[in-house]
Amino acid sequence: MSRLTRLQDTDSYQTRDGSKIRELMHPAQHGNQQQSLAEAVILVGQKTRVHHHKQSEELYHITHGTGCMTLGEEQFAVQPGDTICIPPGMAHCIENTGSEALHILCMCAPPYSHDDTVIMSDEE
């Protein structure tokens, strides 16, 4: 298994929350063990579905674009350079409020799993 991935060589897919992601490093594909790293892209005017993860702690790092993060009862604006810690069990979603695609690096420990994602709303 490769310890190197290149974004341009990585296919994207849609997660249960409605975001489009590319797995940059995941145990199922790359041989790492304790965490996963993906890039999520939220298009202009779109919002992920409200969800939480049963086990994974998640970090979002905004690399491009602007948005509004909902974390539990809190809402706040996000921009490039911002990092958000999302504890296991914490409801969250993010909306692209800008004029260009919102790019987010998503780190999960333990690694991301569809089975660990609980959808809490039908919003998209």
Image: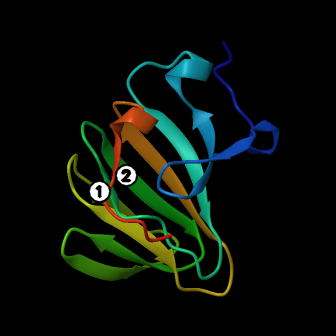
The answer, for residue 101, to whether it is visible in the render is yes
The residue depicted at 62 percent of the width and 61 percent of the height is 41
Q: Is residue 43 above or below residue 25?
A: below
Q: Nearer the viewer, residue 11 or 36?
A: 11
Q: Position of residue 54 (x, y in %)?
A: 24, 40
* Image quadrant containing the N terminus: top right
Q: Is residue 84 above or below residue 110?
A: below
Image quadrant of residue 108?
top left
Image quadrant of residue 109?
top left
Q: Decide if residue 33 is on the left or right side of residue 53.
A: right
Q: Position of residue 36 (x, y in %)?
A: 47, 34
The residue depicted at 81 percent of the width and 44 percent of the height is 8
Residue receiving disc 2: 59
The answer, for residue 112, to whether it is visible in the render is no
How is colour applied across the structure in the image?
Answer: rainbow
Q: Position of residue 27 (x, y in %)?
A: 51, 21
Residue receiving disc 1: 85
Q: Tag 1's secondary structure? A: strand
Of the numbered discs in the image, which one, if any, rests on residue 52? none
- Amino acid type at mark 2: Leu
Residue occupying the far front of the picture: 122
Q: Tag 2's secondary structure? A: strand
Mark count: 2
- Amino acid type at mark 1: Cys
Image quadrant of residue 64?
bottom right
Are dots 2 and 1 in contact, CB under 8 Å?
yes
Give how far apart the Cα atoms at labels 2 and 1 are.
5 Å
The residue depicted at 47 percent of the width and 56 percent of the height is 17
Packing grade of label 2 (10 A; few <14, some 14-19, many >=20) is some
Q: Decide if residue 49 is on the left or right side of residue 7.
A: left
The residue depicted at 25 percent of the width and 36 percent of the height is 55
Residue occupying the far top of the picture: 1
